[in-house]
Image (spheres, rainbow, N blue to C red):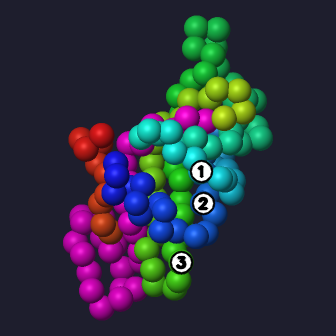
């Protein structure tokens, strides 16, 4: 987890929060990230509370989300953090499930085989949590 936090701190670009509504429509929002222990705290997307997933028994359903830090330069690595988000008011608490530094295959002359067919560096796997 420390490695993910250290990599995130190196990025100067504002990250994107990527969500998918229950109908399958993706949505990207620029967000400001805060850390609370091993979790990310981010503002909830504007329509998050409109998603018809909440029930009386489970008023704040957990949903899968991703946070994407774009590469700082052409050919650089993007940081992709996956997690599950639960809402508290207009804030999401994201528990990390995975993280990877990712760039297009062929961006450089080197290739680190991570099994994804691209040039990836695995930072956090589900078993590492």
User: What secondary structure is marked by label 1?
Assistant: loop
Q: Residues within 10 Å of mark 1 (few under 14, many from 20)?
A: some
Q: Is mark 2 in CB contact (under 8 Å) with mark 1?
A: yes
**Residue at image point 66% right, 46% down:** 25
Dot placed on the residue nearer the N-terminal end, 2 or 1 = 2
Q: Which residues are magenta?
A: 92-119
The residue that label 3 is drawn on is 72
Q: Nearer the viewer, mark 2 or mark 1?
A: 1
Magenta stretch encompasses residue 93: yes
User: What secondary structure is marked by label 2?
Assistant: loop
Residue 77, image x and y in percent? 43, 74
Residue 91, image x and y in percent? 66, 35
**Residue at image point 77% right, 41% down:** 46
Can residue 67 be seen? yes
In the rendered structure, find residue 15 and report the number of the disc placed on it. 2
In the rendered structure, find residue 33 and report the number of the disc placed on it. 1
Quadrant position of residue 116 = bottom left
- 6 vs 45, left or right, is left
Residue 6, image x and y in percent? 40, 60
Q: Is mark 2 in CB contact (under 8 Å) with mark 3?
A: no
Dot placed on the residue nearer the N-terminal end, 3 or 1 = 1
């Amino acid at each position: 987890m420390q490695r993910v936090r250290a990599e995130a701190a190196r990025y100067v670009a504002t990250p994107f929060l990527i969500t998918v509504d229950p109908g399958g429509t993706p949505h990207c929002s620029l967000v400001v990230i805060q850390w609370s222990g091993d979790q990310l705290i981010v503002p909830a997307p504007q329509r998050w509370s409109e998603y018809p997933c909440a029930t009386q028994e489970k008023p704040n359903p957990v949903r899968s989300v991703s946070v994407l830090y774009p590469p700082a330069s052409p050919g650089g690595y993007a940081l992709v953090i996956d997690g599950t988000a639960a809402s508290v008011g207009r804030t999401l608490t994201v528990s990390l499930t995975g993280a990877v530094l990712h760039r297009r295959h062929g961006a450089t002359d080197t290739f680190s085989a991570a099994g994804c067919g691209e040039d990836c560096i695995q930072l956090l796997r589900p078993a590492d949590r």
